[in-house]
Amino acid sequence: MINKKQKIIIANWKMNPVDLVEAENLIKTVRRGIKKSDDRKVIICPPSIYLSKIKTNSHFDLGIQNIFWEDKGAYTGEVSVLMAKNLDVKYAIVGHSERRLYMKETNEMINAKIVSTLKNNLKVVLCIGESLAEKNKDRASEIIERQIREALKNIKKSQISNLIIAYEPIWAIGTGQTPSQDEVMSMSLFLKKIITNLYDRKTAENLDILYGGSVNSQNALDFVDSTGMNGLLVGGASLNASEFVRIVNLFG
Ligand code: PGA
């Protein structure tokens, strides 16, 4: 399957680095290293407290790792879409498995975040994926279908152009274990089938679906193109500037 769409490479720094100077050095090296190319888009998602310090340029856009569903008000510790947009943020990651696990985020909460983010014209990166126990019990498809259906409740077809789905098997995140290319391809087809059923084939065809989980410069190419995936969500390897630059430059 040859995929001619612009590839999307997202860096998810998670709760790293702990030092602003280190964050600025990381972004400086990335900015210097990545070539300008229309073949792919790069999105950097630093901790939200650094967002105001990181200036975007034509080489990359900014994303936020999490977002709240209300625009403003008495929600201690939360950050709204309106605030993120003020800082030139273009994307919000929603539903990452670490938030589902540690912050007990449910599909219903994730849906509220998606509704608010799309309503306020920010793009959403929806993370979905199965745990090892679910995979071993052959329940991956069922879990993933539920994650998508519940997350996209009341989302209109016209809004799907502002959505990216990142398939991240939980057992592959930060473990060095990855699914086979066949498994990744089956999943991209399955995701397109779900979107076709919820909306239509054209919407599914145009949707960007990414792979995430233990991506590095050695395996990055394996997960894209031939699998039907249109890019990558990179965690650990995005904290090493030269490794992340290598990954990005593989795609143009
Ligand atoms: P990883 O993380 O690349 O370190 O496995 C990916 C992610 O959680 O987004």
Image: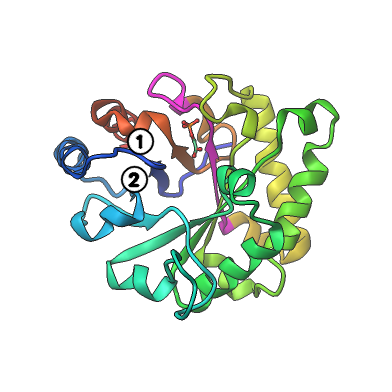
Q: Badge 1: how crowded within 10 Å, few (<14), some, or many (20+)? A: some
Which quadrant holds residue 33?
A: top left
Q: Where does the C terminus fall, quadrant-wise? A: top left
**Vertical side of 172 occupied by 36: above or below:** below
Q: Is residue 196 above or below residue 219?
A: below
Residue that carries the numbered disc 1 in the rendered image: 251
Q: Is residue 91 left or right of residue 188?
A: left
Q: Is residue 145 visible?
A: yes
Identity, as a three-letter code, of the amino acid under mark 1: Phe
Position above or below: 250 against 76 = above
Q: Residue at x 35, y 35 (%)?
A: 251
Disc tally is: 2
* Spatial separation of the CA atoms under disc 1 and disc 2: 7 Å
The reply, left or right, for residue 64 in relation to residue 18 is: right
Question: Is the C-beta of the residue carrying label 2 under 8 Å from the nearest atom of ligand 1?
Answer: no
Magenta stretch?
206-221
Q: Quadrant of residue 97?
A: top right
Query: Which of 132 and 100 lies nearest the eye of the viewer?
Result: 100
Percent of width and height locating residue 216:
41, 24
Of 63 and 101, nearer the camera is 101
Assess disc 2: are there few (<14), some (14-19) or many (≥20) residues with their C-alpha within 10 Å of its C-alpha.
Answer: few
Whole-percent x, y for residue 71 in the image: 47, 79
Q: Secondary structure at mark 2?
A: loop
Question: Given contact means CB atoms under 8 Å apart, are the residues at marks 1 and 2 in contact?
Answer: yes
- Give the residue type at disc 2: Asp
Secondary structure, mark 1, is loop
Ligand 1 closer than 8 Å to label 1 CB: no
Asked whether residue 55 appears in the rendered view, the answer is no
In magenta segment, residue 220: yes
For residue 39, which numbered disc appears in the image? 2
